Amino acid sequence: MPLYESTFVVRQDASVHDVNNITKGYVQLVEKLSGTILKKESWGLRVLSHKIKKNTKGHYVMLSIDVGAEAIKELERQYKFNENIIVFLTLKVKKIEEGASIMMSAPTEVEAIV
């Protein structure tokens, strides 16, 4: 099956618990659609480059997925229905990076302040 990296941003006022529950729901959806989650990363609360739906910050989550194209269409359709998700992007990739992504080593807003 093709490989995808799907990143979505959750509203700034959502708690970490809410973000985890949202992510868990999408992981279950992918598995229900005969896909596999190869990697799941929460990049934390970060400042957006510009306001999106009145939000200046957002909780970033990236899923590396091995699933068919029809399942990706359904996943993106579900993103659109969720009012907590302010933006998302899904890319088809040739391979999934081993280990943590570069975003995991970049400081989050909270780490930068401390």
Image (cartoon, rainbow, N blue to C red):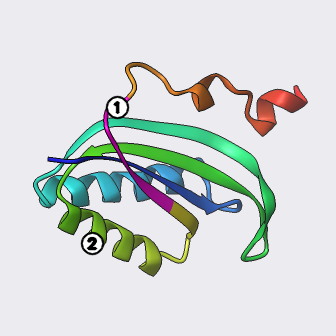
Three-letter amino acid code at the position of disc 1: Ile
- Dots 1, 2 in contact, CB < 8 A: no
Quadrant location, the C terminus: top right
Give the answer, above or below, for where 74 lies relative to 112.
below
Give the answer, above or below, for where 56 lies relative to 96.
below
Looking at this view, name the residue that lies furthest to the bottom.
81
Identify the disc placed on residue 74. Answer: 2
Taking the image as shown, residue 77 lies to the left or right of residue 68, namely right
- How far apart marks 1 and 2 lie (CA) works out to 21 Å
Q: Residue at x 80, y 56 (%)?
A: 49
Task: Specify the segment rendered in magenta.
Answer: 89-96
Taking the image as shown, residue 7 lies to the left or right of residue 68, namely right
* Callout 1 secondary element: loop
Q: Residue at x 51, y 47 (%)?
A: 61
In terms of sequence position, does the residue under pointer 1 or pointer 2 come before the other?
2
Q: Residue at x 59, y 60 (%)?
A: 10
Looking at this view, name the residue that lies furthest to the right.
113
Image coordinates of residue 44 in percent, x first then y, are 63, 41
Mark 1 lies on residue:
96
Image coordinates of residue 95 in percent, x first then y, are 31, 32
